[in-house]
Image (spheres, rainbow, N blue to C red):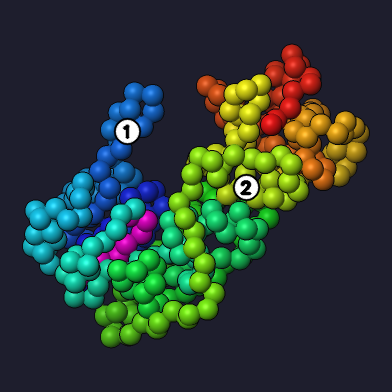
Amino acid sequence: MRLLFAGTPAVAVPVLEGLAKIHQISAILTRPPAPQGRSSRLVPSPVEAWGRDHRIEVLTPQSMKDPQFVQAVRGIAPQCCPVVAYGGLITPELLRIPTHGWINLHFSILPAYRGAAPVQRALLDGCTQTGITTFLLEPALDSGPVYLQQSVDIAPNETAGDLLDALAVLGAQSMAETMEMIEAGYQPTAQPDQGISYAPKITAEDARLDIGVPASRVVNRVRAMSPEPGAWALLGGQRFKILRARLADPQDVSSLAADGVLGRLAATKKHLFCHVRDGWIELMEVQAIGKKVMTGADWARGALASDPGAYLE
């Protein structure tokens, strides 16, 4: 089929690559270059970079209602438009253009976790299973009829980044299969009315750790916010990121004496721990403000030597 692919982050690239091996990618739709780093230099999205490398036309409209952009899509005359994490609303006018519609790959088993952050919200909720759904886009949020769904188990210490990478590989296979189903005339099935939940966009405040909750909830928030935006707490009044954490092994903390101070940091030769409401968690990867990402143990060897009473708040 002749496809217009819509996507923006790196997680969309495996799906794009898979489709390009089978179908004609006539053009790519992605978000405009965004400022990054201290210099705020404009950087193209991973999907745009892939398109440029493969000499495919790339569309980066500031507005989906731009008449020139809409006319460009009409001129491409796509038979179908696969979508993976594009990051913008496809207008009703655009939805009517392709013969077989816009087919979205969503990282949950719909109708659960409709919205922008299904993987992060599932990890925040402590889910042990999630999956992918391919479905026909409609004007309402993630409500369209379903082509394919596939469930996967979530490993205990898997982060959002880890899980998205795995789901992208699975999604590439499922999107290719969905295109085959469309070519064969398969009709999608309506979503059930029960089990609807929502996954709103993650904010910086969502990434703030509450050290006063049970260890499992602290760890789940760290997992959900890694790698971006990164869970954080205050250390000496400055933001301190925790990018990987897990429940502490009881044997590793048997010699540590909790003094009742929530957020107290303590270290052994190989581990860094934080005291929370019901015990200890291990901080595996951390990042102090202005510093590079380090293992918790490496950071502690320098920082805790000069401040053994340090604690997170």
Q: Residue at x 60, y 35 (%)?
A: 232
Q: Is residue 167 magenta?
A: no
Q: Residue at x 76, y 29 (%)?
A: 265
Q: Position of residue 37 (x, y in %)?
A: 39, 28
Judging by the rendered image, the residue that carries numbered circle 2 is 221
Judging by the rendered image, the residue that carries numbered circle 1 is 35
Characterize the local packing of mark 1: few (<14), some (14-19) or many (20 or more) Cα atoms within 10 angstroms: few
- Give the mark, 2 or 1, whose residue is nearer the N terminus: 1
Characterize the local packing of mark 2: few (<14), some (14-19) or many (20 or more) Cα atoms within 10 angstroms: many
16 or 71, which is in the foreground? 71
Write the start and end of the magenta stretch as one range.
78-86
* Residue furthest out toward the top: 306
Asked if residue 299 lies left or right of residue 159, the reply is: right
Q: Mark 2 is on which residue type?
A: Arg
Q: Mark 1 is on which residue type?
A: Pro
Q: Is residue 84 magenta?
A: yes
The quarter of the displayed image where residue 129 is located: bottom right
**Looking at the image, residue 134 lies above or below residue 226:** below
Q: Are marks 2 and 1 in contact (CB under 8 Å)?
A: no
Q: Residue at x 86, y 38 (%)?
A: 253
Q: Residue at x 26, y 51 (%)?
A: 30
Q: Position of residue 261 (x, y in %)?
A: 81, 31
Check disc 1 and report its element: helix, strand or loop: strand
